[in-house]
Image (cartoon, grey):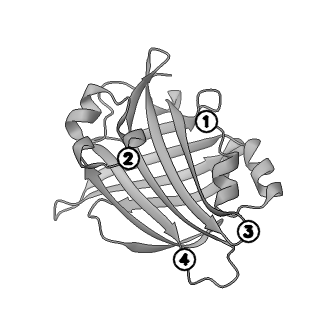
Amino acid sequence: MAAPLSVTTKNLSGVFVTNKQLSDSTEELLRLQGVPWYKRNIAKMFNITLSINHYTDDSGVEHIDMEQKLSGGISGGSDNHTLDWQERDVNDSVFGLLHVKTHRLSLESIEEEFLKAGWTEDTVTDGVIHTVISNDPEKPDDDYTWKSEQAWGFQLVNGERKHVRLVSLTSSSKKDGPQHVRIRAVYDYSENNH
């Protein structure tokens, strides 16, 4: 289902479901983040539903709190972002300790062309939600060191307005050296919003 015009990067509250047919494969992205083969194959079987609460606190700082559910109602945990560009440590059930910082950013301020392309007019006007996530390079048993830069907003996909997240990941492993992958994740606005 297309996202209504009332849902923007300034008001992301709602329920969104991964559209696997319109999204790029996450196989290489997950591999470069050190996710084992069997977990990558399990991930292919599930759709992810994001229940997003986007609000501004009393001090004027925006927050995006997300509850993730896998197909069948299995909890996928929470993913909360404070849009103040302060780095926060987050313990993730899949990736372990992550360093995360998020803010609203104009497209002119983004360096990578891939993250700037294809946004709707309202996303261009309001800015994208820009987040940078990296794993903990101090973790001695981690073969992969990676950094993900993401831009969230809205794009017209096959003529329908969709929530989109563009992800650019740089990874380095002892075995493969530095590598780069870019993907587009597309989300349908859920009928469960009514």
| Label 4 to label 1: alpha-carbon separation | 26 Å
Residue 52 lies, in percent from the top left, at 43, 47
Residue located farthest toward the left when viewing the structure as drawn: 59
> Could you tell me how far apart the alpha carbons at marks 4 and 2 are, in whole angstroms?
23 Å
Q: For the image shown, how many numbered marks are present on the structure?
A: 4
Of the residues shown, which amino acid type is indicated by label 2? Glu
The answer to the question of whether label 2 and label 3 lie on touching residues, with beta carbons closer than 8 A, is no
Say which residue label 4 marks.
136
| Quarter that holds the C terminus | top left
Question: Label 3 amino acid?
Answer: Lys
Q: SS of the residue at dot 1?
A: loop
Q: Identity of the amino acid at label 4? A: Asp
Mark 2: secondary structure? loop
Residue at left offset 28%, top offset 34%:
123
Q: Which mark is residue 24?
A: 1
Give the mark nearer the N terminus: 4 vs 2.
2
User: Could you tell me which residue is drawn at 50 percent across and 22 percent down?
Assistant: 1
Q: Choose between 56 and 185: the one closer to the eye.
A: 185
Q: Residue at x 32, y 49 (%)?
A: 111
Marks 1 and 3, how far apart at CA:
25 Å
| Residue type marked 1 | Asp
The alpha-carbon separation of the residues under discs 1 and 2 comes to 18 Å
Q: Which mark is residue 175?
A: 3
Dot in front, 1 or 3: 3
Q: Decide: marks 4, 3 in contact (CB < 8 A)?
A: no
The residue that disc 2 covers is 112
Task: Estimate how packed mark 3 is, as few (under 14), some (14 to 19) or many (20 or more) residues with alpha carbons within 10 Å.
Answer: few
